[in-house]
Image (tube, rainbow, N blue to C red):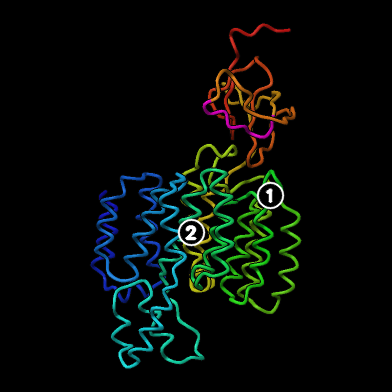
């Protein structure tokens, strides 16, 4: 509570215009949001404080707090609200205002609202491209849809479909956030069990007319295949490196994506969820949220002086192998069954938790959506979930063959 109030006081006491000009101001909002990661209702007090922050920064901060608090919960009401915000076309209102009062453009620029600063940019001339504000609330709403709905499979599939529609008719800030939202839904998961993939969608976005949308799509491809050595994504990125050979910013994004695909020689994962997707991983989720918010201004931050912010992704990287050790912490090779996880919540008796399994000897790699269980009764695990490093102890009731 004290840290959240200190961050809010920074946003309220500093000059609003200077905070909105500085793209790094978004990190103050993200820091406050991460304090309430997954806390749901506990964020209400901070939300009331955020409403006192004027202008675009206030709406950016409010949505960041809300989306972080409900991350991974699958709250349908929040998803509906965020989709409604992301789907609004606020630029039309600005254009009508500019047409009605062309002489009052400086006055309207200082009025509070999500698009107030951007409205004066389009009034200067028809041929000039519209200037969008750096801290855009609609882009946060788009990311928030992926954050909230990503906790379960059905919500993920529906969100991918919604994002395809939003990308067609949404405003430019929304279009720039869609690739990052898709990356949040399928981090380190380039292909689903049913064969569908967001990689095909992202590969189309990499040739978008808007350079920042293409940059975000390339970075999102790297996140989707992070640590998997996926050959399809690797070959796509190689062809993109040739295609964007003369554009340094986009080429830099391609090199970052290639590094993410081959991270840890294919032995790590960046997924914000545990392999069977039953539980979020707070550290990885926080790192990915921060990285996505930074990527909303990839050109100003990563391609500017703050490229070191990419090191945030290190917090999300962790080995995806299962290693078993004994009570003296020495490596222990045991037989385990690895297969696709099955949701057994609410089923009577002792149903099988995996299907289509294969028997391996540890250490063994776990893909996203897979679960492992011991194939022998000789040892008992000290944890309920077999993932990462697991300590085993001898079963006192075990009778050898």
Q: Which residue appears at 68% of the width and 18% of the height? A: 376
Quarter-of-image position of residue 355: top right
Q: Dot 2: what SS?
A: helix
- Callout 2 crowding tier (Cα within 10 Å): few <14, some 14–19, many ≥20: many
In which quadrant will I find the C terminus? top right
Q: Dot 1: what SS?
A: loop
- Which of these two is toward me, 330 or 372? 372
- Which of these two is toward me, 19 or 175? 175
Left or right placement of residue 287 versus residue 342 in this view: left
Q: Position of residue 65 (x, y in %)?
A: 36, 55
Please say if the residues under marks 1 and 2 sit with CB atoms less than 8 Å apart.
no
Q: Which residue appears at 38% of the width and 59% of the height? A: 63
Disc on res. 143: 2
Q: Position of residue 137 (x, y in %)?
A: 40, 66
Disc on res. 264: none
Left or right placement of residue 238 versus residue 47 in this view: right
Q: Which residues are magenta?
A: 338-346
Q: Is residue 329 magenta?
A: no
Q: Which residue is mark 1?
A: 191
User: How many discs appear?
Assistant: 2
Q: CA distance from mark 1 to mark 2?
A: 21 Å
Q: Position of residue 44 (x, y in %)?
A: 28, 50
Q: Is residue 343 magenta?
A: yes
Q: Earlier in the sequence, mark 1 or mark 2?
A: 2
- Callout 1 crowding tier (Cα within 10 Å): few <14, some 14–19, many ≥20: some
Q: Position of residue 239 (x, y in %)?
A: 75, 68
- Which of these two is toward me, 140 or 291? 140
Q: Which residue appears at 69% of the width and 23% of the height? A: 334
**384 to 189, vertically: above or below:** above
**192 to 366, vertically: above or below:** below
Left or right placement of residue 222 versus residue 108 in this view: right
């Amino acid at each position: 509570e004290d840290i959240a109030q200190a961050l809010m006081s920074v946003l309220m006491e500093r000059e609003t215009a200077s905070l909105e000009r500085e793209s790094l101001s978004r990190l103050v909002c993200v820091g406050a949001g991460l304090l309430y990661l997954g806390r749901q209702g506990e964020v209400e007090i901070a939300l009331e404080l955020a409403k006192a922050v004027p202008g675009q920064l206030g709406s950016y901060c409010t949505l960041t707090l809300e989306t972080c608090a409900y991350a991974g919960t699958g709250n349908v009401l929040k998803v509906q609200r965020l989709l409604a915000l992301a789907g609004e076309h606020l630029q039309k209102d600005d254009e009508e205002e500019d047409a009605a009062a062309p002489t009052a453009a400086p006055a309207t620029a200082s009025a509070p609202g999500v698009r107030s600063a951007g409205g004066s940019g389009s009034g200067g001339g028809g041929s000039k491209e519209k200037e969008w504000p750096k801290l855009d609330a609609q882009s946060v709403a788009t990311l928030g849809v992926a954050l909230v709905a990503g906790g379960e499979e059905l919500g993920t599939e529906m969100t991918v479909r919604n994002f395809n529609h939003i990308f067609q008719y949404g405003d430019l800030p929304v279009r720039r956030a869609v690739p990052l939202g898709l990356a949040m839904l399928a981090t380190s998961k380039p292909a689903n069990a049913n064969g569908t993939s967001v990689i095909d969608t992202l590969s189309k976005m990499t040739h978008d007319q808007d350079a920042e949308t293409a940059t975000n799509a390339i970075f999102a491809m790297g996140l989707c295949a992070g640590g998997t050595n996926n050959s399809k994504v690797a070959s796509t990125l190689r062809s993109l490196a040739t295609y964007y050979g003369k554009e340094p910013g986009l080429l830099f994004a391609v090199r970052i994506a290639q590094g993410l695909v081959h991270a840890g020689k294919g032995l790590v994962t960046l997924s914000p969820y545990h392999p069977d997707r039953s539980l979020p991983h707070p550290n990885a989720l926080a790192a990915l949220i921060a990285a996505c918010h930074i990527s909303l201004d990839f050109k100003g931050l990563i391609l500017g002086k703050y490229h070191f912010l990419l090191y945030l992704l290190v917090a999300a990287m962790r080995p995806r192998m299962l290693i078993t050790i004994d009570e003296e912490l020495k490596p222990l090779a045991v037989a385990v069954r690895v297969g696709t996880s099955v949701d057994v919540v609410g089923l009577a008796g002792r149903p099988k938790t995996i299907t289509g399994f294969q028997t391996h000897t540890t250490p063994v790699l776990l893909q996203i959506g897979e679960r492992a269980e011991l194939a022998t009764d000789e040892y008992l695990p000290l944890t309920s979930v077999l993932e990462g490093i697991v300590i085993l102890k001898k079963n006192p009731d075990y009778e050898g063959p």
